[in-house]
Amino acid sequence: WIGEPADSVTINLLADGTKVQSVTLNASNNWQAEFNNLPVYNQETGAKITYTIAETAIPGYTSGISGTAETGFTVTNTITGKVSVPVTKKWIGKEAASVTINLLADGITVQQVTLNASNNWQHTFTDLEQYKDGKEISYTIEEVAISGYKSLITGNQADGFVVTNTNTETTAIPVEKHWIGEPADSVTINLLVDGTKVQSVTLNTSNNWKSEFNNLPVYNQKTGDKIVYTIEEQNIDGYTSAITKNGETYIIMNTNTAKISIPVEKQWIGKATESVTINLLADGIKVQSINLTADTNWQATFDKLMKYDPTDGHEITYAIEEVAISGYITTITGSMMNGFIVENKQNDIPVEPENPGNPTPDPKVPETGNPTPDPEVPETGNPIPDLEVPKTGNPSPNNVLPQTGAKSYMIQIGMAVVFVLVGGSVIYQKKKSK
């Protein structure tokens, strides 16, 4: 036998081409038998008989007979079965456009097929000889290599083969740290897959606050699903964190949340008003206002002020201004670090009159070179009565003018009184001499 034997075979003995006997061979007689007591000559013609044998055909086998009647005959049966070999392609990750599968018979390529989406990534090699020279052929497959994939072949020729291609594409995820306000010494960035940390990197001034997660598989090597990568930052006290994406780069923005307080105190020179309004300015823009009164002891504090601008990170410059008060001059001193003092000075405080250092001397009657002529007195028939000089109730001693704060005005009045007295005296003397 070449190949798996049948249960039994029938061997026919032919004498000059005519079947004269038969024997059954099987495992019980060890596939051997002997035709005995055969006449050498034809009993009718006397010719020597030629003996040969023939095998009753067995489906699935070919038969080959060798030998002679003298030496014996050997019947060789070769199995002639056909086989089919199915093959299926599976993908883990993004699939390629097509793949080429080679069929090998005892290690030698005998057929080739292309698998793609059109044939549903499947094919069956059919009508294959199962045996060669009675020996069963070993059929295997191989895949023509595809860049970016690794190939795994499972199965056998009886059950079929499965070719699994895993996408080995990798990616990189760059990360950058940006700061609003004064930065920390360093930060730790974690790379997550499905919420699980798989890698970490530390960012600081040494790496210019930049790094990259490299050689990351794009597809899950078991399920073929595309991996979703995310990042997170380990919490830093005193900062808030916001993560955005610019293209493939993750930007981690940390905002310094430091707060400051600025005290304000009001001081008065002169009478205080009921209240004042103080505006707080951040980089020149009013952001808050407070009212100071006697109830607040003319003091207040602007609390919980952002030290750094959340838009660009610069340190905010705080200043104050006072809503103008009529009748007062405002002076502001101090700083955002130490606090501000607002001084209001009343600008219409009454001024106490000054005591004159030297009393005004008695006024002197001006001397003229020519005496004033007597005025002509109109004659009316009625004599002009003598003029009387008015008497003051309490004449000021030594002609010292009262201290009223209007010194020049009183001097003018005094000089006018003197001129009236002198003029009246002259008129009286003229009249008396007549």
Image (cartoon, rainbow, N blue to C red):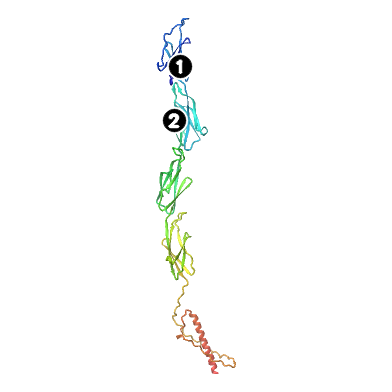
The answer to whether 12 is drawn above or below residue 179 in the figure is above
The answer to whether 209 is drawn above or below residue 298 in the figure is above
Image location (x, y in percent) of residue 240: 43, 52
In this picture, residue 378 sits left or right of residue 66 = right
Residue beneath the point at 47% across and 35% down: 91
Residue 155 tag number: 2
Residue beneath the point at 49% across and 80% down: 408
Q: Secondary structure at mark 1?
A: strand
For the question of whether residue 265 can be seen, the reply is: no
Few, some or many C-alpha atoms within 10 Å of disc 1 (few <14, some 14-19, many ≥20)?
Answer: few
For the question of whether residue 161 can be seen, the reply is: yes
Few, some or many C-alpha atoms within 10 Å of disc 2 (few <14, some 14-19, many ≥20)?
Answer: few
Image location (x, y in percent) of residue 147: 47, 36
Image location (x, y in percent) of residue 416: 52, 84
Q: Are marks 1 and 2 in contact (CB under 8 Å)?
A: no
**In this figure, which residue is indicated by the disc labeled 1?**
64
Specify the amino acid type for callout 2: Gly
Q: Earlier in the sequence, mark 1 or mark 2?
A: 1
Specify the amino acid type for callout 1: Gly
Q: Secondary structure at mark 2?
A: strand
